[in-house]
């Protein structure tokens, strides 16, 4: 085979590989078609400055049947799904720790095949408190019941490959300031280690303990101290 033929073959192979890599991003919307009973909804999710939001899980919760329909945005902030006509839907997006209500939409009944675009524009909070993350008393050992919340965080980070975070550990004011700083730092690192063990790059997760220095409630009551003993996710970049 001469040099020209080899070059052409190489270029053809690169083109085929490129098509194979990029095609899955568009298959979801191209395969879906509106029907007499279902409307095609093309979802666009952007931040308030217009930046596409990748890896956002958008759900449409049926008011009538309670069924849930969802899709996950691609790197262009887009996804598509089919919704049964003649129903209202509560639209929600998935934050790191919970479902957040956005708006309600009405998909009318009609004989014509219906396609429409639904745009969500929002900027999620930059700091989340991880719910249901527990440690043994006075130690940095994660308890088994923490896995549910941490697995959700792993899922979010896999859906958003550009997301980098800081795990921030906090304590109440019981004990010395230094011991609380060390404990909170160890606990933050325990969460970081969990994420890394479950496939998240160590470059995407920082950890820092703030001890008792950033309370969100009074340390004069049991409830207040419990609020202060928390683990936060702080968004660095996305």
Image (cartoon, grey):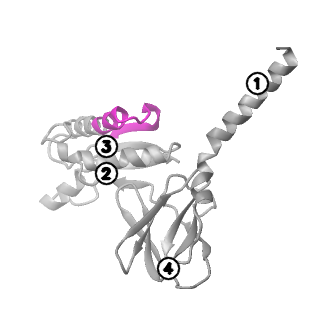
Are circles 3 and 4 on residues that touch, CB within 8 Å?
Answer: no
Report x, y in % for residue 162. 53, 43
Are circles 1 and 3 on residues that touch, CB within 8 Å?
Answer: no
In the image, is residue 148 part of the stretch drawn in magenta? no
* Disc 2 element: loop
Quadrant showing the N terminus: top right
The vertical placement of 87 against 10, above or below, is below
Q: Residue 86 carries which label?
A: none
Report the residue marked by disc 4: 85
Report x, y in % for residue 21. 62, 39
Q: How far apart are marks 2 and 4 (CA)?
A: 49 Å
Report the residue marked by disc 3: 210
Are circles 3 and 2 on residues that touch, CB within 8 Å?
Answer: yes
Label whose residue precedes the other's in the sequence (1 or 4): 1
Q: In this view, does 131 lie to the left or right of 23?
A: left
Mark 4: few/some/many CA within 10 Å (<14, 14-19, 20+): some
Are circles 2 and 4 on residues that touch, CB within 8 Å?
Answer: no
Q: Is residue 130 visible?
A: yes
Report the residue marked by disc 2: 214
In the image, is residue 208 part of the stretch drawn in magenta? yes
Question: Which of the two marks, 2 or 4, is nearer to us in this view?
Answer: 4
Q: Distance between the residues labelled 1 and 3?
A: 55 Å
Report the residue marked by disc 1: 10
Q: Which residue is drawn at 60% across and 52% down?
A: 27
């Amino acid at each position: 085979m001469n040099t020209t033929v080899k070059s052409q073959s190489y270029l053809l192979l690169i083109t085929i590989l490129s098509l194979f890599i990029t095609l899955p991003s568009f298959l979801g919307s191209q395969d879906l078609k509106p029907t007499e009973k279902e409307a095609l909804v093309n979802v666009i999710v952007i931040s308030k400055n217009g930046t596409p939001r990748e890896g956002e899980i958008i759900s449409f919760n049926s008011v009538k049947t309670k069924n849930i329909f969802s899709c996950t945005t691609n790197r262009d902030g887009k996804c598509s799904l089919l919704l049964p006509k003649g129903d209202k839907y509560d639209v929600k997006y998935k934050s790191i720790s919970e479902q957040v209500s956005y708006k309600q939409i009405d998909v009318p009944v009609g004989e014509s095949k219906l396609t429409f675009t639904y745009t969500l524009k929002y900027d999620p909070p930059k700091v989340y408190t991880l719910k249901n993350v527990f440690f043994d008393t006075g130690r940095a050992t994660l308890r088994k019941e923490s896995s549910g919340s941490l697995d959700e965080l792993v899922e979010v980070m896999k859906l958003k490959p550009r997301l980098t975070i800081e795990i921030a550990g906090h304590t109440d004011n019981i004990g010395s300031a230094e011991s609380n700083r060390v404990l909170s730092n160890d606990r933050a690192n325990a969460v970081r280690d969990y994420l890394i063990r479950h496939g998240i790059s160590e470059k995407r997760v920082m950890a820092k303990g703030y001890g008792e220095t950033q309370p969100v409630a009074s340390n004069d009551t049991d409830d207040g101290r419990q609020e202060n003993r928390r683990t936060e996710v702080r968004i660095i970049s996305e």
